[in-house]
Amino acid sequence: MQVFITGGSGYIGRSTIQALIRHGDEVTALARSEHSARTLTDLGATPVAGALGDTDVLREAARRADGVIHLGVDYAGGTAEADRAAAQALQEGAGSGPYVHTGGVWVYGDTDGVVGEDAPHSPPRITAWRLENEKEVLARAATGGLPVVVMPGLVYGHSGGLTQAYFVEPGRAAGAVPCIGDGSNHWALVHVDDLAELYVLALNAPAGSVYAGVGGENLPLADITRALSHAAGCPGKIESVTLEEAVRRMGPLAEAFALDQQLSGARARRELGWKPTRLDALADLAQG
């Protein structure tokens, strides 16, 4: 299969390209800069010059592919509108071929224990825009499209992702890793390599499917920040901060970090045969 991917040079995208190639797929990937193009080439993908706003480029690249994975996000401004336009162009190009769209479990807000994909939505402001976009994406299943939505949990691994940027690096600079509140809230975690395997499997999922990309480890933030303190070089040094202070430092993303979420990835295991293998998140996080 030839797969076109957006966001391929990013954190999740790099692992996803490697997974696709391991499965024997050929990959073309959007490249917004020469640096991105070099990264993609080094990974074994063929770069397609363009940005998420270049809908004609997206449409044509998707038309030439057998399947599409949309990972890219434009945070420069008008995120919701940019994502909606990109998704529309990619789905138009993909036609009746598989189209895998990226969501996120934060749209569920605080969960009452462990929940699945059918739980009610209560998103924090930073991710509320996703709901309408995902609704439009999935609606194409009724007109012959093959849309699938993958909703990653908090992604970690290979010293990257949000934990590195918002906890490890500030902790290294300050000598203590921040912990929002008392740390009793849970994060639904997934290793980036396991998530990449889910994206590959999702290319063969039934139209209209939604999968929570979570590895099954729903850990308290207090335990996570203790592990991250080792990666930051300040073992056991934790700074408790209020949500208000966290928002001041991190922006509205702090509201998502403060959610109490426990989710199951049982649907993807049952329907797609997904088998996460990285199931010691605290050890991985402590290594950085």
Image: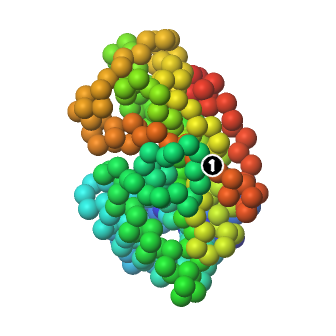
Inspect the image, locate mark 1, and give the three-letter code of the amino acid beneath it.
Ser
Q: Secondary structure at mark 1?
A: loop
| Residue 102 image point, x, y percent | 50, 60
Residue pointed to by mark 1: 264
Decide: few, some or many residues near mark 1? Use Cα within 10 Å; few <14, some 14-19, many ≥20: many
Look at 47% across and 33% down and name the residue there: 185
| Residue 128 image point, x, y percent | 35, 57
32 vs 98, left or right, is left
287 vs 232, left or right, is right
Q: Nearer the viewer, residue 183 or 29?
A: 183
| Residue 220 image point, x, y percent | 52, 29
Please identify the quadrant where the N terminus is shown. Answer: bottom right
Q: Relative to residue 148, is residue 269 depicted above or below?
A: above
124 vs 44, left or right, is left
Q: Is residue 21 visible?
A: no
Colour scheme in use: rainbow
Can you tell which quarter of the image residue 25 is in?
bottom right
Q: Nearer the viewer, residue 98 or 272?
A: 272
Can you tell which quarter of the image residue 87 is in?
bottom left
